[in-house]
Amino acid sequence: MTFTEGGVTAAKGFKAADAAAGIKYQGRPDMAMILSSVMCKAAGTFTTNVVKAAPVIWDRDIVKGSGLAQAVVINSGIANACTGEEGMKYCRETASAVFEKLAVPENAVLVASTGVIGMQLRIDRIRDGISMMSGSLSDTIEAGHKAARAIMTTDTKPKEAAVSFRAGGKDIVLGGMCKGSGMIHPNMCTMLCFLTTDINISQELLQEALSCSIQDTFNMVSVDGDTSTNDTVLLLANGLARNPEITEKNDDYYSFCEALKEVNTKLCRMIAGDGEGATALFEVEIKGADTKEQAKVLARSVVSSNLVKAAICGHDANWGRILCAMGYSGAEFDPDRTDLYFESAAGKIQIMSAGTGCCFSEEEATRILSEPEVKAIAVIGKGPESAVAWGCDLTHGYIDINADYRS
């Protein structure tokens, strides 16, 4: 398996486009479209927030219904959340506009929105955007890159990844793009992620592979402790690699699962490192746990702690905050058997041994914590399980962005 260039257009048969439709932003692209040349098997995971945006309900019904899709239309700027029946009507009208331009069945059009909650979409601008994109769809890497830029809100950079691997004697490609910078917490996934692949696989196994992958990737990301109303991960498989259809959990299936893990992990790290106002990607690894769930609960608690995140921002090796966050996580562990380390490209330092602080150089610790990617490692015993969670530091920039987000 190797990482390759591109995102949603890296796999055979997928095209993408972007448009500046003036949904909320002016002078920048704010709509994107993904189109497969043939019908795809579709899988998805969605927010666990009780308040669900209209596109979440629309997509969930398609994935759980026919499990087939051919196009995805995404807008940024307005979330189409808490918009009542009118919001659902706009999903239907978006699908209808795609059918008029590209003859894709309305029940095979997925939609996604991100942005301000409670505002109604301008459906005339959505239709105009679809019209513009229908005439500019392309399978180039650049087209996929432009689509990734168009779905950004407070993101500072586009987020894409793709891998190639072998299955059934054929070359397979899996690519994806995502957006997410704020309102991100491990209760499903990030805000929006779109994955495309040319593998031939049953819809049931496609969904199972995605659902399993989410648990150790997007469910382990936290920027600010808020789970969005719009969280969506969609995975489309068009089968154009022509491998024998994967209908059982064989070597080809597990190769695909490994590819999903690699792509999703890379996208997760991009999201965490680009958290609103962030200056550093913060990774937490728990080792020596008795169970996987124990390790995951502890890692998520540390990466979500505002006090820990603030210490990372200040390059302060305040290990007491990490131990405290582990202590209130709800997972049982023995602090008197716990060792803590900080690690980055600048080196590695032990800061706690068997529940007691070590004699370490504060200057060296600060140097290690001053890198753009910082890792905390907690070894809690000699168990076989481990887990990794991703987040970012907490800076004044987060408040600056969110204090006037609507305006």
Image: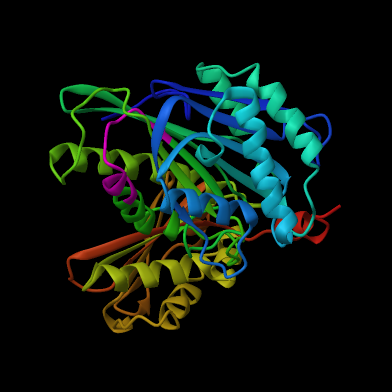
- Residue situated furthest left in the rendering: 250
Q: In the rendered view, tell whether residue 48 sits above or below residue 177.
A: below
Q: Does the magenta stretch include residue 155?
A: no
Q: Can residue 154 be seen in this view?
A: no
Count of labels in the image: 0
- Residue at image x 48%, y 48%? 62
* Front residue (pair 166, 136): 136
Q: In the rendered view, tell whether residue 69 sits above or below residue 387.
A: above
Q: In the rendered view, tell whether residue 180 sits above or below residue 312.
A: above
Q: Is residue 200 magenta?
A: yes
* Front residue (pair 176, 3): 176
- Residue at image x 65%, y 16%? 135
In the rendered image, residue 11, in percent from the top left (x then y), is placed at 39, 24
Q: Is residue 274 visible?
A: yes
Instruction: Say which quadrant the N terminus sits in.
Output: top left
In the rendered image, residue 136, in percent from the top left (x then y), is placed at 64, 17
- Residue situated furthest right in the rendering: 407
- Residue at image x 61%, y 36%? 73
Where is residue 230, by image quadrant? bottom right
Taking the image as shown, residue 252 lies to the left or right of residue 181, namely: left
Taking the image as shown, residue 113 lies to the left or right of residue 328, namely: right
- Residue at image x 53%, y 49%? 59
Q: What stretch is highlighted in magenta?
A: 196-207
